[in-house]
Image (tube, helix red, strand yellow):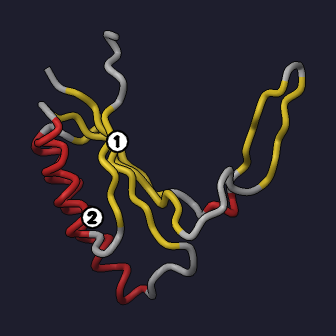
Amino acid sequence: MTQKYLLSIYQPAGDPPPPEVLEPIMRNVAALTEEMREAGAWVFNGPLHPPSTATVVQSKGSDVLVTDGPFIEGKEYLGGFTIIQAADLDEALGWGRRLAAVLEPLWIEVRPFVDEAS
């Protein structure tokens, strides 16, 4: 039985790297994604726009508040993610390590989804 894991990619606020730096990184991400697919681990992945494009929606009683901007201001933000399925945490951490190596020096958080059977 496999467990789904979220590999969150955190990056610093600010401008993205120039194309000559970013393009080889994105090629390496695409190659790793293909390896995940071939191994049967890949479920879904995607990059996100900067936090300035976010909209926060919160219910307060009978009202729903809608606010422009990120929920939390910070020096780092969630820049993208990959959802994988793995036999256990060790296998998920293996994919997390590979993703971290491709995206050095960014941070990768590996977190399991709550078991659907629970």
For mark 2, does the 10 Å Cα neighbourhood hold few (<14), some (14 to 19), or many (20 or more) residues? some
* 81 to 18, vertically: above or below: above
Q: Nearer the viewer, residue 61 or 68?
A: 61
- The local secondary structure at tag 2 comes to helix
Q: Where residue 6 is drawn, which disc sits there?
A: 1
- Residue 106 x, y percent position in the rendering: 35, 69
Say which quadrant the C terminus sits in: top left
Residue 4, percent from left and from top: 28, 31
What residue lies at 50% left-to-right and 79% top-to-bottom? 16
Say above or below: 26 vs 54.
Answer: below
60 or 87: which is nearer to us? 60
Question: Residue 64 lies in what quarter of the image?
Answer: top right
Which residue occupies the foreground of this view, 63 or 27?
Answer: 63
Q: Secondary structure at mark 1?
A: strand
Residues at discs 2 and 1 in contact (Cβ within 8 Å)? no
- On screen, residue 110 versus residue 77, left or right, reads left
**Percent x, y of residue 89:** 17, 38
Q: Quadrant of residue 26?
A: bottom left
For label 1, count other residues whose C-alpha is less than 10 Å away and answer few (under 14), some (14-19) or many (20+): many
Whether residue 28 sits left or right of residue 73 in the image: it is left
Residue type at mark 1: give it.
Leu
| Left or right of residue 66: residue 106 | left
* Residue 29 marker: 2
The reply, left or right, for residue 111 in relation to residue 69 is left
At 18% across and 58% down in the image, what residue appears? 97
Counting from the top left corner in percent of width and height, residue 86 is at 17, 35
Between circles 2 and 1, the one closer to the viewer is 1
**Disc 2 marks which amino acid?**
Val
- Locate the N terminus by quadrant: top left
